[in-house]
Every structure is written in C-alpha cells, then in structure tokens.
Amino acid sequence: MTELPETNTTNETNKTNESTEMTELNETTETTGTTGTTEVTPALVEKAYIALLSCDRAEASPYWAEHVRFSVPGRHAQAGWHEGLDELLAFRRALTEAAGGDFQVELVTSMISGNENMDVVKVHAVRKGAPADSTSPFDVLDALGVQVFRWEDGRIVEGHAGFFGDGSTNYDQWWSPLDGDGNRRYH
C-alpha cells in the first residue's frame, strides 16, 4: 500500500519522498497499459494522485487534462460531475478545507488495462471543528473505495469514484451541512 501525502489548505505544495517504493503497487501491470505515446504505469498513476492532492494547478496539469471530467459519488452539494481542471481542483480544495487541511488518501492497489486504470483507495478525514473523540460518521470519514480513470496522451481525461459498503452513506453524512444531532454546522 502506498500512503499518499496528506493535503493542507495552504499554498504549500506536498512533495513525495523520492525513495518511495513502488513495489507495493501491482508490478505486473507496470508495462501493460499505453495511451498515445505515454505508457500508463503505477508510477504515473501515483504521480497523478500526488499532483491532484497538492491542489496546485501547475503540479496537476501535467497529469490531468484541461477538459477532465470527474464524477463524485453521493447525494450532497459536491456530488456529480466536476467539469474541467479548475472545477476538479476547486472540489479538491473544498474537500481539504472541510477536513481542516488533513484529508488522507491511501492507494491500496492500482490495476491498469490499456488507457484505463482502476485504483482501490482508503480515505480518512475528520471534519474541521469535530470533537477530538468523535466517532460520528458526520464527523469522521473512513471509507474504502474505487476510482476509475481514462487516460489520453499521458493525462487523465475522465474519472469516476465510488465507495464500498457503508462508505457511500458515510461520505454523504460527512459532507452533510448537519451534524449528527441534526443541527446546522454552518451559521
């Protein structure tokens, strides 16, 4: 499993340690996928995640197409299609801000076929302002999910995300403007 860097709401760019071992990703897929002249490999997939988690346009644009479309699952204000790199980055910033600057994504495995990859991810976040000992799904997001991406010319052009089991409900509750007692979070 590859732990991706945590994100923050400052303009600092998160960097990954150059010595991060990629051997924990599915090595058998490293040379199977190609798109255009750029081969989709686990290392490229990881770089795309790290670039997006930085919330920095200059870091993201080498891996995410200007016209990227990304479908966020759920029934909440952030759900649905995010069209274009700026909109996707705005979603990432909102996610990071809602988590008080600490939204964690762990890339469990990456499977590649041609110009598509599917990644199993674990996500963890605690809502900004949540009580330190809270276990409420309105405050704490702990979910296992999958993301599927389509690549063209070395950049992601489309993505879909989904969660397993109660992860979808947890994600909706975590994004809710209400807390676990039904009170509005924002005044």
Image: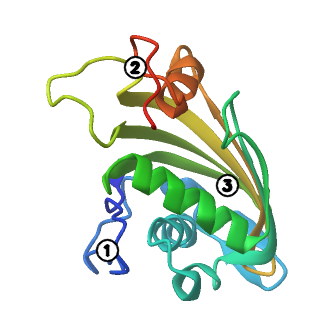
- Label 2 CA crowd tier, 10 Å (few <14, some 14–19, many 20+): many
**Residue annotated with mark 1:** 16
Residue 30 lies, in percent from the top left, at 58, 64
110 up-or-down from 136: above or below: below
Left or right: residue 150 versus residue 24 is right
Disc 1 residue type? Thr
Instruction: Of the two numbered discs 2 and 1 on the same chain, state the one appearing first in sequence.
Output: 1
**Residue annotated with mark 2:** 137
Q: Quadrant of residue 79?
A: top right
Disc 2 secondary structure class: loop
Of the pair 149 and 186, the residue shown nearer to us: 186
Q: CA distance from mark 2 to mark 1?
A: 30 Å
**Residue annotated with mark 3:** 112
- Label 1 CA crowd tier, 10 Å (few <14, some 14–19, many 20+): some
Of the pair 85 and 121, the residue shown nearer to us: 85
Q: CA distance from mark 3 to mark 2?
A: 32 Å
Instruction: Of the two numbered discs 1 and 3 on the same chain, state the one appearing first in sequence.
Output: 1
